[in-house]
Each structure stands twice: as C-alpha cells, then as structure tokens.
Image: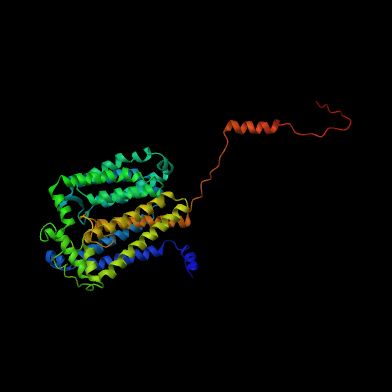
Amino acid sequence: MLAHWRAESQKWPMDYWLLGLLIMLVMMGLMMVASSSVAISEQRFGHPNHYLIRQIISMGLGLFAAYLFFHVPLGMWENNRGKLFLFGVLLLVAVLIFGREINGSKRWLPLGIMNFQPSEFMKLVIVIFMAGYLDRHASAVKENLGAVTRLALPFGVMAILLLLEPDYGSTFVIAIMITGMLLIAGAPWRYFALTVLPMVVILVALVVNSEYRMARVTSFLDPWQDPFGAGYQLTQALIASGSGEWFGTGLGGSVQKLLYLPDAHTDFLFSIYGEEFGFIGVVFLVLLYLAILHRLFRIGHKAWNANHVFGSMVCFGIGIWIILQAGINMGVNLGAFPTKGLTLPFMSYGGSSLLMMSIAMAVVFRVDYETRFYPRPKPEKVTEAMPDEKTASKESVKTSPQKKTPKKGVKVKTS
C-alpha cells in the first residue's frame, strides 16, 4: 500500500503532503492569533478581532503572491539573483533612513496597509543567491577556500546593515543558513568557523559594550533576579508554559494573554500555545515542523537527483530557515535563548513574515513541479583526448602496417 501511495504521489502536480501540513500550520496560527490577541486588541482598538482580521488579510496577500510566484520559472530567479540581492541591500538602507522605530529598533518600512520588514525579504534573497552561487561553483567550494571568502564582501555589507537596525536574530539566522547550505553543497566543516564565528564575535562585542543588551542577556540567564523588571517578559512566558502542564487549559483558556505577557500574539505566541494545549500540544507542533522539514528536504533531494541543483539548494535553504527560526523562537519562549524578535513561522502575528514565507513555499512548489515534469539530463562526463592526440591516433591507424598474406610463387625475404 505504501508503494502504491508513493507511485500515485509521483503523478501529482505538487507535493500535496507538504501542502496539507502547511494548511494545518496556518490554520493553527490563525486560531492562536485569535486567542492570544483578544485582550490587547480590545484594549487598543475596542474590539477583540483587530489582529485576527489583519492576519487574515496578510494571509490572503500571501496566497495571492504565492499563486503569482509559483508561475515564475526557476531560471528567472537564478538569472536575476544578483539584482535581487542589490534590491534587498537597498531596502536595508531605506529602512535605516525612512524606517519606523518600534522598541528601539528600525526594522519596518511603513507601506500604508502594512509595515514591511526588509530583513524577512533578505532571508529569501540569501537562499536564492546562495543556491545560484553553489550551482555554478559547487566544485570550487569543495576545494578552494577563495570560493567561500569571495562571499565575505556582499554578506559583510548585509550583516552591517542588519546590525545597525539592530536585528541580531535575523543576522544570526542568515549566517547559519549560509553555513548550512555550504555544508550541504559539500564544503569542508572548517568553513563553519569562517562564516559563523566572526558573526558570534561581533555579536558578543556589541553585547558587552552596551548596558541595555547586557541586561537582556543577564535577565535571560536568570530572569527571576528581576521578575518585575528586565526579566518580566520571560518570567511571564515561563509561567504560561508551565501552566499548561500535560494537556493545557484548552483553547481560549490562557490567563497570561490577559495583558500579563507582552507580545503574546507575536514573539511569545508559543508560550500561549503551550498554556492552552500543554506538553502534548507542544510535541505535536514540534513534530509538525519536523514533518515540513522532511518534505522540504525530500523535494530538495529529488531535485538534486533530477539535476536541478539550483532548485535543490533552494529547498535545503528554505528548510534550514524555517526549522532554525522555529527552534529559536521556541527556545526564547522557554528561556533557552535571549530574546531575538523572531516570529514562529506561519503562526505568529506578522504580515511580512507570513508574506515572505508564502512566497518561499511557492518557490519550493515550483521546484517540485519542474522536478516532476521537466527533469534535466545528467551531464555526461566524457574524457576526450587532446586534438593532437586524436589526429595522431587516426594517422597511426591509417599508416599502421597490416599483416598481408604473401602471394604464391613470391619469395619472402626474411632476415
């Protein structure tokens, strides 16, 4: 039966298993945004569904954008990856000049109907740029250190702009994404030190030289030292997660969302989810993200076998992006990491994140579509002789002495 299902799934125009998992995750996200934002929405706007309505609008924009970008051939992304990277850098510059400042960070460009976060766009651009680079320089990356160091200039400029916002979480996620794609492409493990360690050193230096950032780190290490000051948000998140116990308080039964836990519908939605659905619900959510990662890597593996190297690396990069951001968000909510300002993919409230994740998944489905119906022939490795050797071999065949049978009556002279 399993073999039959696999055979039937090959006839599908796309991976319906992945589509079903994403629909389930998005529906859970809408449900949790509706539940976690009731009190804050009532306080700020006078009705409980303000954030839910905006999230539904963002989801509608994401679906429309996904439909459009699904019809974009992979070749268009690959051929214009440099232009996309320059456009992303310009957006990062623009947000520093014209951006909207929230909680001391300039990360959002006001677009009227929504605030757009260029760092979310940059994550997708990095995946496409790296996929194209690895497609063209795969062998060089495995053998030549210079092929990796060439990436230092463009990514260094991007990292500086992100740190000026500041957006340390996105900078760290992008560094891990780049490293992960390099390792999957076959680069040696020592390149991990070249890509991640400098970023870690810079982040540590910025934390040490800032009292505000140092306070956030120390509060993360022991939030109970100042439970009503620097550690307030984390202590409330831990209370929410612990209150869920095994099976949770039930949908809508959270107490911490009633203006006790700040950002309950954005960065700390996972804590409200844990409170309402308990440990069993958290395990289910983790398994759901792992299942999505499995489908993404499966599509990437199939694309690799069909010689769509660019599409394969895109799937691997997007898979790393989603699982890494989800893991960091959960870790922040559970007190394992300092607060990063990263959303829970497809669940937390945020138009930019939902929009860019939808476009990213549309690109993945395009990879799956082209892999199924337009596989590329394997490049033939033919070891040919040099032109002079070919000519010489042909002439030697023509002029080589052939053994002839002597005619009758003719004496053959032998030495």
Q: Quadrant of residue 356?
A: bottom left
Q: Residue at x 15, y 56 (%)?
A: 219
The number of discs equals 0
Q: Residue placed farthest to the right in the image?
A: 409
Horizontal and vertical percent for residue 167?
A: 21, 50
Q: Closer to the camera, 401 or 183?
A: 183
User: Residue at 79% of width from left, 34% of height from top?
Assistant: 404
| Colour convention | rainbow
Q: Position of residue 90 (x, y in %)?
A: 25, 44
Can residue 175 be seen from the camera position used here?
A: yes
Q: Residue 65 placed where, x, y %?
A: 32, 57
Could you tell me residue 327's position as x and y percent?
A: 28, 58
Compared with 222, 201 (above or below) is above
Judge by depth and name the residue closer to the eye, 141 or 128.
Answer: 141
The image quadrant that residue 143 belongs to is top left
Would residue 172 appear left or right of 15 to someone viewing this image? left
Q: For residue 90, say whether it is visible.
A: no
In the picture, measured across the screen, residue 130 lies left or right of residue 274, that is: right
Quarter of the image with the C terminus is top right
Determine whether 35 is above or below 107 in the image: below
Q: In which quadrant of the rendered view does residue 249 lie?
A: bottom left
Image side of residue 43 versus residue 77, left or right: left
